[in-house]
Amino acid sequence: MPVSGRDLYDDPRFFEGYHRLRQTGTGINDAIEIPALARLLPPVEGASVIDLGCGAGALARRLAAAGAEDVVAVDASERMLEAAAPHPKVRYVRADLETLTLPSSCADLAVSSMALHYVADYPGLVRRIADWLRPGGRLVFSHEHPVCTAHRLMPGWIPTGDGTIWPLDDYAAEGPRTQNWIIEGVVKYHRHTATLINALLDAGLELTGISEPAPDAAALAARPALAEHLRRPPILVLAAQRAAP
């Protein structure tokens, strides 16, 4: 049975497997995604921040430690929020990103780490984020790269006589995809790179940064298996800004 993003991290099988992945550092988060996101983040000293899809709150706590005045960390998963360590400047909120409402102009920065590919109405969420940002406020988020979500079966690397290939197919057909990742039936949403960017522009935001990060030399020396991510980008990181008055 397919499992949507709002329910995924409360599935005990998935939660256990994901927790193990993060604890052992065997995913791409520590080596690729976290450094790439950090490079596009603005200074956060004194900022009010929203963390969308905060999980166990690691990014929210890093931003608080870097000087953010307050961080509203939002996630739909009860299990993930129960696993989140407290911080005096972080307020955890259990809510579904599809229906989350916040006051207009309440934040200087909105961030999201590998969560928005679970959201069905991405353009609608981006419009709400644009409303939550103060003039000059920023949005920075990472998203599974469209070349990874395109294939309807999401089979991963396919063995060939000479090694492996990454299958890029069905790119033009946007919509839900079901993948076996940690458990069977994980639902994600495939969108064109243009769709991800144009939703920002349509919401009145200005694109300020784009990154398709790959592992650096230090990461490859520590984990040679990461070299497969030199062959196709695993994630896309976008940054945008609400115009100042």
Image (cartoon, rainbow, N blue to C red):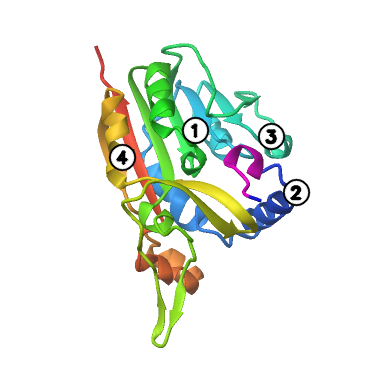
Report whether residue 44 is seen.
Answer: no
* Residue 81 badge: 3
Q: Residues within 10 Å of mark 1 (few under 14, many from 20)?
A: few
User: Which sits in the foreground, 15 or 84?
Assistant: 15
Residue type, numbered disc 1? Ala
| Label pair 2/4, CB-CB below 8 angstroms | no
Q: Residues within 10 Å of mark 4 (few under 14, many from 20)?
A: some
Tell me which numbered mark, 1 or 3, is placed earlier along the sequence: 1
Which is closer to the viewer, label 1 or label 3?
A: 3
- The residue singled out by tag 2 in the image is 12
- Mark earlier in primary sequence (3, 2): 2
User: Which secondary structure, mark 4?
Assistant: helix
Quarter of image, res 8: top right
Position of residue 231 measured from the top left corner of the image (x, y, whole percent): 35, 68
Magenta range is 2-8
Label 3 close to label 2 by CB (< 8 Å): no
Q: Secondary structure at mark 2?
A: helix
**Residue 53 against residue 217 in the figure, above or below:** above
Q: Nearer the viewer, mark 4 or mark 3?
A: 4
Q: Nearer the viewer, mark 1 or mark 4?
A: 4
Q: Would residue 188 appear left or right of 213 to someone viewing this image? A: right
Left or right relative to 199: residue 89: right
Residue 234, image x, y percentages: 41, 57
Per the rendering, the mark at residue 195 is 4
Disc 1 designates what residue? 66
Q: Nearer the viewer, mark 1 or mark 2?
A: 2
x then y, percent, for residue 213: 36, 55
